[in-house]
């Protein structure tokens, strides 16, 4: 569970830093308003996608090593 929380914080922290970078760039350069909105929407979409993947992996649980999977398959067949 701690690893999942660490991963969430890493993803959120990365997106936060990118958002600050975008903010810094638009203060220095003349950037069209629609481009700024598009960049921010895309960043949020990526953030949600990777948080969703993380959530899906956490729900699925750990995947056993292929050798362990093979042994479990053989045990079930008996």
Image (spheres, helix red, strand yellow):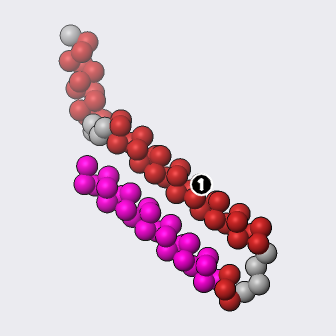
Residue at 53 percent across and 50 percent down: it is 49
Q: Residue 45: in sight, yes or no?
A: yes
- Look at the image and say whether residue 16 sits in the magenta stretch: yes
- Disc count in the image? 1
Q: Give the range drawn in magenta.
A: 1-25
- Look at the image and say whether residue 9 sits in the magenta stretch: yes
Q: Residue 63: in sight, yes or no?
A: no
Quadrant in which residue 45 is drawn:
bottom right
Q: How crowded is mark 1: few (under 14 residues within 10 Å), some or many (20 or more)?
A: few
Residue at 36 percent across and 58 percent down: it is 7
Q: Which residue lies furthest to the top in this view?
A: 78
Q: In this view, does 65 lie to the left or right of 25?
A: left
Mark 1 element type: helix
Our reading of the magenta stretch's main secondary structure is helix
Q: Where's residue 57, x and y in %?
A: 38, 42
Residue at 54 percent across and 72 percent down: it is 18
Q: Is residue 61 left or right of residue 10?
A: left
Q: Where's residue 42, x and y in %?
A: 64, 59
**Is 69 in front, or is 42?**
42
> Which image quarter holds the C terminus?
top left
Q: In this view, does 57 lie to the left or right of 72?
A: right
Eyeballing the image, is 74 above or below 35? above
Residue on which the image places disc 1: 45
**Is 60 in front, or is 27?**
27
Eyeballing the image, is 24 above or below 69? below
């Amino acid at each position: 569970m701690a690893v999942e929380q660490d991963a969430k914080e890493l993803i959120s922290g990365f997106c936060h830093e990118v958002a600050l970078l975008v903010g810094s760039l638009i203060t220095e350069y003349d950037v069209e308003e629609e481009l700024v909105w598009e960049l921010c929407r895309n960043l949020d979409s990526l953030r949600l996608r990777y948080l969703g993947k993380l959530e899906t992996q956490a729900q699925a649980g750990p995947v056993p090593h292929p050798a362990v999977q093979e042994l479990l398959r053989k045990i079930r067949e008996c």
